Amino acid sequence: ISWEDSTFVITGGRNEFMVNLNTVEKIELKSSCLLAPKIIPRMPFAIYDHMSFFVGDKFMFCGGHKRPGVLNKQCFGLSSTPGSNWTELANLPRLLYNSADAVIKNKAFLIGGYEEAPVDDV
């Protein structure tokens, strides 16, 4: 797996039947067909409303809902090394979903979002 500026990664979510998904799809703009994504190893569990981002050569996801009313504070990372699998990383300090994220100098910042109520700090 290689991460490039012309790559979209779609993770988790819910389908039209409100079933949680654990798939990860990589779509490269350079390919001839955007409808033929390369499948990356499935996430460890189905999740939605999570935050996902790149830090260095690692694609990561944190937080979100495991199911309605059940929040998650776990974080996982996937290295760009071929054949890599998801590894569990340090947990978020609290349950969190729908935060904005920014990566600066190989550090991820989650801004705002929700616990059970809106969060207004970093």
Image: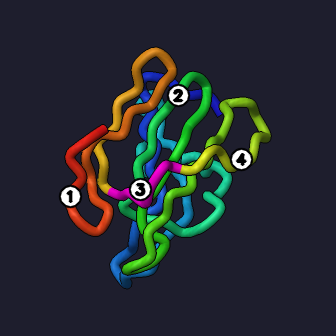
Residue shown at the point (41%, 26%) measured from the top left: 103
Pick whichever of labels 1 and 3 is earlier in the sequence. Answer: 3
| Magenta residues (range) | 92-97
Pick whichever of labels 4 and 2 is earlier in the sequence. Answer: 2
The answer to which image quadrant residue 111 occupies is top left
For label 1, the SS is loop
Residue shown at the point (44%, 55%) measured from the top left: 94
Residue shown at the point (68%, 49%) measured from the top left: 88
The amino acid on which the numbered mark 3 sits, given as a three-letter code, is His
Q: How many marks?
A: 4
Q: Which mark is on residue 118?
A: 1
Which percent across, then down, holds residue 41? 67, 53
Which residue carries the number 3 mark? 50
Pick whichever of labels 1 and 2 is earlier in the sequence. Answer: 2
Identify the residue at the far right of this view: 83
Between the C-alphas of marks 1 and 3, the distance is 15 Å
**Which one is closest to the eye, mark 1 or mark 2?**
1
Between the C-alphas of marks 4 and 3, the distance is 16 Å
Which percent across, then down, holds residue 33? 44, 42
Which residue carries the number 4 mark? 87
For label 3, the SS is loop
14 or 70: nearer the eye?
70
The amino acid on which the numbered mark 1 sits, given as a three-letter code, is Pro
Pick whichever of labels 4 and 3 is earlier in the sequence. Answer: 3
Check the picture and name the quadrant holding the C terminus. Answer: top left
Pick whichever of labels 1 and 4 is earlier in the sequence. Answer: 4
Which residue carries the number 2 mark? 55
Query: Is 6 situated left or right of 75 in this image?
Result: left
Which percent across, then down, holds residue 61? 51, 48
43 or 119: nearer the eye?
119
Residue 32 visible in the shown view: no
